[in-house]
Amino acid sequence: MAAGKGTRMKSKLPKVLHLLAGRALLQHVMDTAAELSARQVVVISGHGAAQVEAAVTAAMGADPRFDLQFVRQEPQLGTGHAVQQALPVLGDDGVVLVLSGDVPLMRAETLQQLIAACAGTRLALLTIDFADPTGYGRIMRRGDTVQAIVEQKDASAEQRAINEIYSGIMAVPAAPLKRWLARLDNKNAQSEYYLTDIVKFAVADGVEVVAHKIADALQVEGVNSPLQLADLERAYQRRTALQLMEHGVRLADPARLDVRGSLQCGQDVAIDVNCVFEGQVSLADDVTVGANCVISNATIGAGAVIHPFTHIEGGKFGSKDAVEVGAGALIGPFARLRPGAKLGTQVHVGNFVEIKNSSLADGAKANHLAYLGDATVGERVNFGAGSITANYDGAFKHRTIIEADVHIGSNCVLIAPLTIGASGTVGGGSTLTKDTPAGALSVARARQVSIPNWKRPQKTK
């Protein structure tokens, strides 16, 4: 269910598209459905329907993991009315799992247990005990079976004292669900069609209603305001940090970590404070990441050191634009690796060096204040401070090739397309426009002239 407006978010963006750990709330729910090997997912949209549907379709990509259907709830007349909109696209076989698009942290294993409780014949409800159940539907039991769910506004004082609440998540056989939904009415305090009313229909039909109770409140926590979203973000990051530390990752402060995607770590990885990992990131054994780094879609080789304030922004993981950093490399501080940066082993990239769509072979160094764009850099090259590859002519990008063991002096401009021959040297301050032979010293700068007794212009009074 993803039709709600989310008024308390105070945003033009539909609530289910707000981000948690770098993904839309609704995307978290759909990813969980994929873990369950769902054969079909039906998204019930409403407020901002076109925007929600476009975002979901884009996130699914060209290779969907399940049959995706959209239906719209317009106007929004309650949870029962929402699920009624899905009836035309639901088959009569199988189990329907009802999930909320603003409850992002439900675990797949919990839902598997709920489906098992349903067993294809029973109505299974996910429940939890809350010390303060205000606002939630209360579970009315007779022994181990559920007799009804009473919504807060319709509950008596005695019923409001019950602490077991309905989470909004259920598993129900498809065929009886269709029959029960057809019998809903809106004769209640909110004049809405409650999905929870199907419980009394199931009881009347002799279908067993069971509750699968959990203790982890985080799994059923919904988002209705920016404050709740921020609280859930911290809870998610804390859970992620604990999982990483259980696998041996050393975090300087678990409260100051943000993983907005997937982070895979080898043994003896150390991560300092305020680091952000986006997309898919892989850190091999013995990698050290300094404070205040942002790393997205990158593979970092064993023993590499990413010094503080480094920014690595790779393209899609697995594509040619993903960033690769070789074993033993030293990166930063204040370095920037952009899409397509491929660094070999023992490469050094120092402060205020930017690299884009370029490869640096083993042992190459660019230690200070440099730019390498659309370049192929050979082994053991030293690229001097203040030097750049001028790769863009205003219309097209061109490539610079710097062969092995070249030394580029400080403040040089290499105007592509250009090849610097192996073991060559480029004198500091040179601007090169032509290929250079192997082993040569190449200098391209004006002759130095000193004029004696030079007087600088002075202002007249």
Image (cartoon, grey):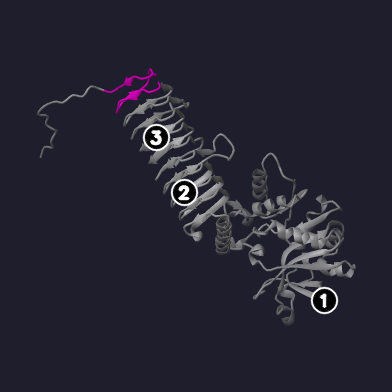
Sequence-first disc among 1 and 3: 1
Sequence-first disc among 2 and 3: 2
Above or below: residue 104 compared with residue 376 = below
Above or below: residue 263 compared with residue 179 = above
Distance of label 1 from label 2 (alpha carbons): 57 Å
Within 10 Å of disc 1 (Cα), the crowding (few <14, some 14-19, many 20+) is few
Residue designated by label 3 = 365
- Res 185 label: none
- Which residue is more in the foreground, 315 or 266? 266
Estimate the x, y position of residue 286 in percent, counting from the top left.
Answer: 49, 47
- Res 142 label: 1
Q: Which residues are magenta?
A: 421-445
Query: Residue placed at 48% from the left, 38% from the top?
Result: 338
Q: Is residue 314 left or right of residue 352?
A: right
Q: Is residue 320 left or right of residue 110?
A: left
Magenta span includes 342: no
- Res 288 label: 2
Give the amino acid type for the residue marked by disc 2 in the picture.
Thr
Foreground label between 1 and 2: 2
Quadrant of the image containing the N terminus: bottom right
Q: Residue furthest bottom?
A: 158
Give the amino acid type for the residue marked by disc 3 in the picture.
Lys
Distance of label 2 from label 3 (alpha carbons): 19 Å
Query: Residue placed at 48% from the left, 52% from the top?
Result: 270
Confirm or deny contact between disc 1 and disc 3 (CB under 8 A).
no
Estimate the x, y position of residue 169 in percent, counting from the top left.
Answer: 73, 62
- Which residue is more in the foreground, 45 or 103? 103
- Which residue is more in the foreground, 55 or 340? 340
